[in-house]
Amino acid sequence: MRMKWFAALVLAAVLGGAGWAQTTPVNPHATSEARALLAFLDSISGKAIVSGQHNYPNDGSRWTDLSYDLTGKYPGIFGGDFGFSGGSDKDSALSRPAMIAEAERQYRNGAIVTLIWHELRPTDDEPVTFHDSVQGHLSDYEWRQLLTPGTPLYKRWCAQVDVVAGYLRQLRDAHIPVLYRPYHEMNGNWFWWGGRPGKDGSAALYRQLYDRFVNIHHLDNLLWVWNANAPSGGAQRLDAYYPGPQYADVVSMDIYGEFKQEYYDKSIALAAGKPIALGEVGDLPSPEVLDNQPRWTYFMEWNEWIQTDNSLDQANAVYHAPQVLSRDDARLAAAMAAIRKAAAGMAPDAEPVTPGATREAKALLARLHAAPGEAAPIGQENDPSAPGEETAAIVQLTQRQPAIYASDLGGSLESRQAVLKEVLRQRANGADIYLSWHPVCPSDNTYSSRRHSGVPTEYKHSQLSDFEWNELLTPGSALNDRWIAQVDEVAATLRELEKAGVAVLWNPYPEPNGKGYWWAERKGIRGSGALYRMLFDRLVDGDGLRNLVWVWETEAGQSQPNNDAGEPSDFFPGLLYIDAVEAGTGRLDPRMYRDLEKMASGKVLGIELTLQIPPPRLLTDSIGWAWYLAGPRIDLSADSATRGAREEGLRLLYRDPRIASLAPAR
């Protein structure tokens, strides 16, 4: 079980409990070690400041070690960079593995880790030069393309930042929290990402990175440090670049020159209670400055400046000041030791994404996590117009009962009530519950017929115009209000199940990368994934449901005539909103598991077999499916050989000892 607050509680004891819990991370699923680190920074605000030293990516710990040589104290923070150049240059991107290894070593030795990236311009390919790329420029047209999901430039940017995400994931898996400071000095005009004020400017790119790192890559070990340059010269005012308090854990400023009181006051005002820090400095802040500006929580000296722009006396005066915490200072060392000790005993995260999930939901997800190493359950879909018919047919065919009962809540109120009654009966017989939701289109709430898996259905599949789609995603619009009423109606049925102690594998808006559904084929941040996220927020925060294990289903293995349809990741809502990923397919392709495994990043994987029933060995040999779901029976108009092959395939699955089913109810 994940000990989300344990490290912070240990840390509170270390610090004497004074003021440690005033700030929580902006990422609601931040790791316990990230929470504890932020709690520590919050606790020392106004009392102490941690020393820090940056190092070029190809320099290892050169400047950290020099700080020790000069002062006799190791900096409390190790700073690193992901680089952009090639060869043996000090900023070489080839040094990333070594830099990550050094960050891990420094953390084990007691240092806090902070990382930045002098990111290459997304129009370029590594290696690049600082002047031509990092300090290059994007046209206004290119900037708009960068912020538009699905464009070639957006995809180039995704590919570039995903490389760095892989290195950050190494630190996540090692339980190392990171103060991550992206797109630093964005209020300046000297980097390609900077100098663009307003909601669609530099702050929008910061938010876009946050969304990708948090919702796609699940980098929950990051604390987000927003950074500006001291507002003078080419650096503009701070508030025009601030992404919003929901995107920043720490507000930081780079100061090369005088530590003016107005810089400090502006940082405090913008932070509004969050910790503030000196992201980069040239001259070290003197003890007198720190006395007058006590709420800075850390400073980071820039590389060789510890020697070139500070005298030996200046460096020692700062490092030996009573409020400055070096790596070996007991106040920092004890806190970091507590964080490392708490993180060392943590198990992999199998907690539901729903905060405060019910005991039944936690148990269901735990069973699915354990299933690939034991016997994964098999389930059967049932048409809501006849909610027990398909399951009864399986019992007659195999003399076994499906371990998962599945149906849909997208029909009328009468059909939902019939499904609810059958769910309670099946759960009493020992089956787990799986419910999908194919809702009618909220623009008209009428029905039309479509054939799904060979079975006629009543689900509505008309389409929304682009204008209507934007209205749907806009709170307060008439269409959004109609959608809320639709969601709250189905929530009432789900609430009845929660009251009865029934957890539900919940699969809303299935196959968004497929065709025919009104919610499908919409890529990007405001596409099908945004609708899924909006539903999560409404059911969890608005309706208070805690019994759902969230499933995201992709149509897998389909053949597309062109590339416009997009990849499954184009429709993915993000790891913070799902507990499991399901592949819906008519024909099994073993490669689909490997592809989904990469995207799911540790989430459980299930498969829905809509047409062809493969031999058991193709499902169970070296494949980690957590459940198997058979779609409704094929159309009775199909030839007898096709029907016979499907029935024989189901018999084989239910006989296989590696696939879990139930004894028929008596």
Image: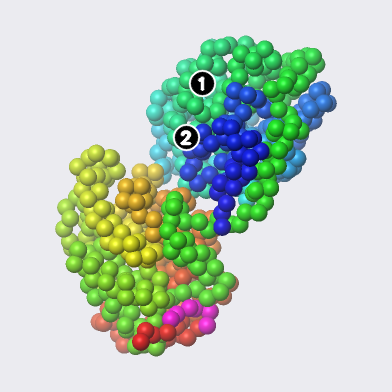
Q: In this view of the protein, which residue sits in the foreground, 254 or 317?
A: 317
Q: Is residue 103 above or below residue 259?
A: below
Q: Which mark is residue 268?
A: 1
Q: Is residue 634 above or below residue 537?
A: below
- Identity, as a three-letter code, of the amino acid under mark 2: Tyr
Q: In this view of the protein, which residue sits in the foreground, 90 or 258?
A: 258
Q: Is residue 69 above or below residue 502?
A: above
Q: Is residue 583 left or right of residue 220?
A: left
Q: Dividing the picture into quarters, in which one does residue 552 lie?
A: bottom left
Q: Determine the residue positioned at 72% across, 21% down.
A: 322
Q: Determine the residue positioned at 56% across, 32% down.
A: 19
Q: How is the image coloured?
A: rainbow
**Considering the image in quadrants, where does the N terminus appear?**
bottom right
- Which span is picked out in magenta? 657-662
| Crowd rating for badge 2 (residues with CA inside 10 Å; few <14, some 14–19, many 20+) | many
What secondary structure do most residues of the magenta stretch adopt?
A: loop
x and y percent of residue 451 in the render? 25, 69
N-terminal label among 2 and 1 = 2
Q: Dividing the picture into quarters, in which one does residue 54 lie?
A: top right
User: Does residue 567 appear anywhere in the picture?
Assistant: no
x and y percent of residue 454 in the render? 28, 74
Secondary-structure class at tag 1: helix
x and y percent of residue 15 in the render? 64, 35
Q: Does the magenta segment cover residue 223? A: no
| Crowd rating for badge 1 (residues with CA inside 10 Å; few <14, some 14–19, many 20+) | some
Q: Determine the residue positioned at 47% across, 25% down.
A: 272
Secondary-structure class at tag 2: helix
Q: Determine the residue positioned at 43% across, 28% down.
A: 201
Per the model, the C-alpha gap separating discs 2 and 1 is 16 Å
The residue where tag 2 is placed is: 247
x and y percent of residue 396 in the render? 34, 88
- Identity, as a three-letter code, of the amino acid under mark 1: Ile
